[in-house]
Image: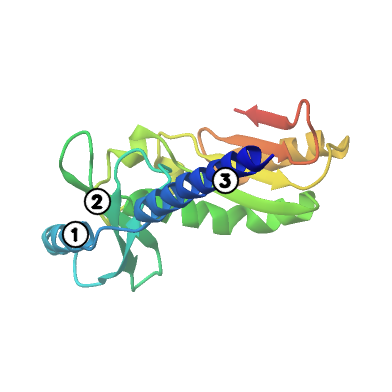
Amino acid sequence: MRKLGKWTLIAMAGAGVIVGFLIVIFIVDMTPDAGKEEEVKEKASAYLDAHFSGQMEMYDTLYDNMGNFNGFDYAAKVRNTTNGVDFTVYEDAASGEMVDTYAVNFFEDELSDLIMEDVEKRFTEIEMVIVSYADPAVTDKYIGETDLPAIQELDAAPSVSIWVNRERKPVDERSVDELLDILKNDLKLPHAQVMVQYQAEEEEGILTKEY
């Protein structure tokens, strides 16, 4: 029994060391590198001077420690002080060039403002609404530009993703059709997609339509 207790204590101590080691690794991975933060700020500052006028203000850095972004680990957070649009400037991992997301965030903010009231009228128990212009016709075409076209002139298909904390209702089908009608006929967008994701459903939890 004494030997069993001894080995149990040893096993517990070993497990504690392993857990502690994993915690240290996690903390290190989650902590941004100050040198890399300073590097991205310097490069972003030079990029802003070269491509934008003085209305762009760098206010923070972003460390992508969870792999949420494909193009970078470190980015500078920037705000257009004229219209309040927040965006990022970073060194693209594939090309090695400094790029920005100003146009993407500008169009996403604009479309979100235009449709949010209509979304909230038609759907209940909304948890989150995301408007996305993840299209090369926007992400690649307008890098470094503030002289942007109207959203009606874009050859791009935005997506409106609506997360609701409930199950699907029969009226949702009509609500999606109405929202698509607004995007197509009222806002005159050439293409668009609407997706409703139901957090309370295990199967068939997504309703998607597009034109």
Label number found at residue 44: 1
Q: Give whichever of discs 2 and 3 has the lower sequence position.
A: 3
- Tell me the element at label 3: helix
Image height of 126 relative to 15, above or below: below
Could you tell me which residue is drawn at 15 percent across and 40 percent down? 96
- Circles 2 and 1, Cβ within 8 Å, touching? The answer is yes
User: Which of the two labelled residues, at mark 2 and mark 1, occupies the earlier sequence position?
Assistant: 1
Identify the residue position indicated by label 3 in the image.
Answer: 12
Q: In 3D space, how far apart are the residues under numbered discs 3 and 1 (Cα atoms)?
A: 49 Å
Residue 46: percent from left, percent from top:
11, 61
Asked if the residue at tag 3 contacts the one at tag 2, i.e. Cβ–Cβ closer than 8 Å, the answer is no
Single out the mark in the foreground, 3 or 1: 3
Which residue type carries mark 2?
A: Tyr
Q: Is residue 177 left or right of residue 16?
A: right
Amino acid type, callout 1: Ala
| Furthest residue in direction front, as rendered | 2
Q: Quadrant of residue 77?
A: bottom left
Q: Give the residue type that dot 3 points to.
A: Met
Residue displayed at 59% across by 42% down: 160
Tell me the number on the disc at residue 90.
2
User: Would you identify the image quadrant in which residue 137 lies?
Assistant: top left
Task: Examine the rendering and report whether any part of residue 210 can be seen.
Answer: yes
Q: How many angstroms separate mark 2 from mark 3 (CA)?
A: 45 Å
Q: Nearer the viewer, residue 94 or 50?
A: 94
Q: Position of residue 40 (x, y in %)?
A: 20, 57
Residue 151 drawn above or below residue 116: above
